[in-house]
Image (cartoon, helix red, strand yellow):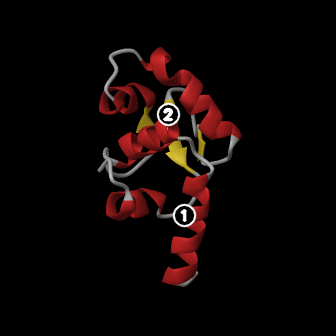
Amino acid sequence: MDDQRRVSVHRESLIQATDTEQRYLAAMASLGLGPYPVAAVARAFGVDDQRKVSVHRESLIQKGLIWSPRRGQVDFTVPLFAEFLKENHSVL
């Protein structure tokens, strides 16, 4: 996939997420390479208990933007999405 097409896919994916969900995605991306422990994502999001953001995590899973490769972990479904967020998201 060329760079222009990849950026278009990433922007399209980001549009699906609410502002709070975008913050959750940005928190994931801030941790480096995935998969990401859900507790670490919650801390990066700014909460001390992962249950406080579980609704956002579940919504992002339902939207197909992230997935859970195993219990207690999440990762992006779109290749290079973390890098896109680091370069383009205002939260990071």
Q: Which labelled disc corresponds to residue 32?
A: none
Q: Is residue 79 above or below residue 72?
A: below
Q: Which labelled disc corresponds to residue 11?
A: 1
Query: The N terminus is located in which quarter?
Result: bottom right
Q: Sequence order check: which comes first, mark 1 or mark 2?
A: 1
Q: CA distance from mark 1 to mark 2?
A: 24 Å
Which percent across, then down, holds residue 6? Answer: 54, 74
Q: Residue at x 39, y 25 (%)?
A: 39
Q: Residue at x 31, y 33 (%)?
A: 44
Q: Residues within 10 Å of mark 1 (few under 14, many from 20)?
A: some
Q: Is residue 71 above or below residue 22?
A: above
Name the amino acid, label 2: Gln
Q: SS class of the residue under badge 2?
A: strand
Q: SS class of the residue under badge 1?
A: helix
59 left or right, relative to 6: right
26 left or right, relative to 4: left
13 left or right, relative to 53: right
- Residue that label 2 marks: 73
Name the amino acid, label 1: Arg
Q: Nearer the viewer, residue 37 or 46?
A: 46
Q: Nearer the viewer, residue 67 or 65?
A: 65
Q: Residue at x 58, y 79 (%)?
A: 5
